[in-house]
Image (cartoon, rainbow, N blue to C red):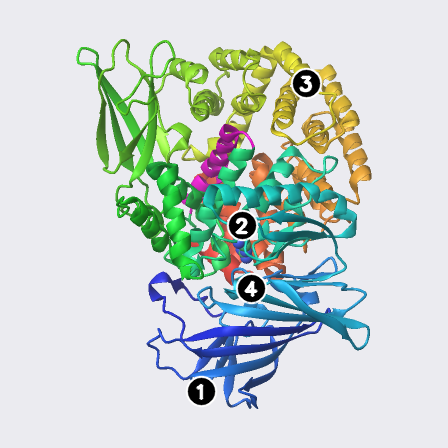
Amino acid sequence: MSQPQVIYLKDYQVPAFLIDQTDLRFELEATKTLVKARLTMRKNPESHSQQRALFLDGDKSLVLHRVAINDQVLSDKDYSRTDDGLTIHDVPDSFVLETVTEINPQENTALEGLYRSDGFYCTQCEAEGFRRITFYLDRPDVMSVFTTTIEADKTTCPVLLSNGNAIDSGDSEGGRHWVTWEDPFRKPAYLFALVAGDLSHVEDSYTTMSGRKVVLQIFADKKDLNKLDHAMTSLKNSMRWDEEVYGREYDLDIFMIVAVDFFNMGAMENKGLNIFNTSCVLASPQTTTDLGFQRVEGVVAHEYFHNWSGNRVTCRDWFQLSLKEGFTVFRDSEFSADFNSRTVKRIEDVSVLRTAQFAEDAGPMAHPIRPSSFIEISNFYTMTIYEKGAEVVRMIHTLLGPDLFRKGSDLYFDRHDGQAVTTDDFVAAMSDASGRDFTQFKRWYEQAGTPELTVSDEYDPAAGVYTLIIQQSCPATPGQNEKLPFHLPVAVGLIDDQGADLPLTNGQTTQVLELTEAEQRFEFTGIHGDKPVPSLLRGFSAPVKLRYPYSRDELVFLMQHDSDGFNRWEASQKLGVDVLQSLTAAYQQGEPLAFDARLSEAYRSVLLDETLDPAMVAKILTLPSEAYLSELVDEIDVDAIHAARTFARQHIANALEAEFIAAYERCSSSEPYSPDADSIAKRALRNLSLAYLVETEKPQHLSLARTQFDNADNMTDSQAALGLLVHSNDEVAASEVLAIFYERWSEESLVVNQWLSVQASDPKLGTLNKVLALMDHPAFTMRNPNKVRALISAFAMQNPVNFHQLDGSGYAFLADRIIELNALNPQIASRLVTPLTRWKRYSEQRQALMKNELQRIMDSGSLSTDVYEVVSKSLV
Ligand code: ARG
Ligand code: ZN
């Protein structure tokens, strides 16, 4: 195998040729689809290239039937083919290029380009899928107007969709028909989409702020038509929110969403024709959990917001991916915060960031939010590009405040509408609109790794001066040994001994300190009385790790008094971490485990305070996850962490049993299910209470879970009870509910996925054999990414105790699946490598086993660029 090529940002050059107009005709057949492309092209006046040869990207799977330039058919000496494209040796300055290419959607298991999902035809072109459809300049800075004609069998494909507006249609021979679509907006090929099949749809409309009426359609399999209301409502809310918060109006007369079951990612923002994984669009109370409802709302918003942050203004090259993804995640998380509890949303986002993204930043695939090189761009749709990218935009928002930020985003959209630009352009617009200097801030785009802040303080009561001393550093990451200091906002408050916020230098109770140096002192004057307790990094104002030597009593105090909701939760987490780390150490040393009652007492007072939002109570009473605890230590001892956390949960459950029973009852409701914030909050606390009660292993609480399972009128309650029973030691109850659940939901693919996950994530020993058996279950197929995630990823990522078994069986199982999937679906295979990339964090014994499996994958034969990149970088 030839060594895959590394692509560098520094090698960027403007395209030598442009495409003004793209006319496509698809003649759809399952195994033999003809793609006829007519490209109106010319030399790029901005290119200095003198080349007469034209190179077009094109995957080796394309079968080329015909090439013509200005109606002259070329012979095979006029061009040459390689594995990655087509070179036409000599082309004029402007010309029309025609190609006829044959592709096989039926056999496309990689789910990139044009493929079939349960009989429907659909496309996924981002990042480089269009080159699997036809020969093209498949790069985001080549933008073209598209017309697309789709011709297909009328019975199996009554619905034929592409970007823009349908402008013509008709019948053709042999029971076939065609529709022509025209997208008036210039776009890169990655935003192209085509859908065909026997789809049903719901329809609504939206009137934009300037009074234009837009038709809204959501397409899905007929049996799922009753699960589209929530997506439609979310879409209309998104359209209104983007007008109100960003002044951005929708621009076409029609907006379509299509739900497909086979999809590598969550969803895709193709112009006017978003394509979604069913898991991110279908929602009904019976089949979808509260989390699922919120995910649909967030993803619908995310893809809709891309219409401006991504489509109207797109990326110059794929190194700029965070330009659209970081900004759009920031936009969707603010949207969700506005429609739900802002603090709870922040807690959820930070939890994900601190487990998954911080781990990525500490591993062999660490990269800045604007990487400087890659082998396979599909590997860079990461937590770093998305979630850390969003945090970086959030910091700009915090530094500027909402009004200047809006001025900056207006300038960005106005200045760059219709262009393909860079993250530098985004920051320049923010800087120009605000007059602020972001030179140092831009290090966030260039340096990988999670910065660490160490905070200490001094207090001079006589002078009334309180001083915070903040030091920052950032660990080395691959290719970056030395890091320069970051510019970052640290939002702080000072709390007096009565629990009240002190007024600060800015006259407010929260002040944003701007850290720019490796070490900096910040003085607060006019502070009297006892030494205040600092509330640091309020709202998690920067994506960093922060250390301050809080005592456990101070943390209990902050849990009760901090006016910043996020930091109240953060105090509970810090206290939980401290207690769990002591327990872990005791477990490792074979000492008896002793529980610090301050934690359960603090929980008790939170649980008894009926004025608190139940969703917040549920968050505060959730111990730091095993994944987060793992992130915080140098060497991860999965068994000790699991034992410590289980011990703490049991202790808390027994100590607060009466309170949990009361909370369970208080949060029960006889109202019909509704996914509104208040009801979601109550269910969250109710199910958390049930989880603690089951932890006591008392039969009456297991019966309570069983009663809830039997009587639930919604998936949130049903699934919560299912999980508790399946993970309990009551084998009989576990197999009973699993059988009932499957029986009830075998026709609902997404629900069956939850059924698979609940089994794969069971921490009891022996789960691997159950997972192996489930791979032969009719509900499972390696070809459907949702099934792979539900079973294989759930086992490898949500079941540390079983995955990390010391006999190496979990690692070997995963490696086998990666090797298998490498041939079927490289993107999904590559994602599955993630747990093995973390080998350096485990004991020597586990390290050796994990590395062994990575090496076995490396040696297994012809690796995709996707898997090759992650495995080779992990073995360094
Ligand atoms: N742009 C899409 C989104 O964030 C994700 C597409 C990812 N595609 C891929 N091949 N990795 O909404
Ligand atoms: Zn996106």
Q: Which span of residues is magenta-colored?
A: 340-363
Disc 1/disc 2 C-alpha distance (Å): 49 Å
Mark 4: secondary structure? loop
Residue 262, quarter of the rendered image: bottom right
Q: Nearer the viewer, mark 1 or mark 4?
A: 1
Magenta segment, prevailing SS (helix, strand or loop): helix
Q: Distance between the residues labelled 1 and 3?
A: 77 Å
Q: Which of 241 and 824 is in front in this view?
A: 241
Report helix, strand or loop for mark 1: loop
Of labels 1 and 4, earlier in sequence is: 1
Q: Looking at the image, can residue 704 be seen? A: yes
The Cα–Cα distance between marks 1 and 4, rounded to whole angstroms, is 38 Å
Residue 861 shows which numbered tag? 4
User: Which residue does the image show at 42% across and 20% down from the upper left?
Assistant: 563
Residue 774 lies, with reference to residue 739, above or below; the image says below
Q: Which is nearer the N-term, disc 1 or disc 3?
A: 1
Magenta includes 563? Answer: no
Return the residue at label 2.
Answer: 210
Task: Give the mark toward the camera: 3 or 4.
Answer: 3
Vertical relation: 263 (above or below) 66? above
The reply to whether callout 3 and callout 2 are in contact (CB within 8 Å) is: no
Q: Position of residue 97 (x, y in %)?
A: 53, 81
Using the rendered view, name the quadrant where residue 491 is placed.
top left
Q: Where residue 697 is drawn, which disc sits there?
A: 3
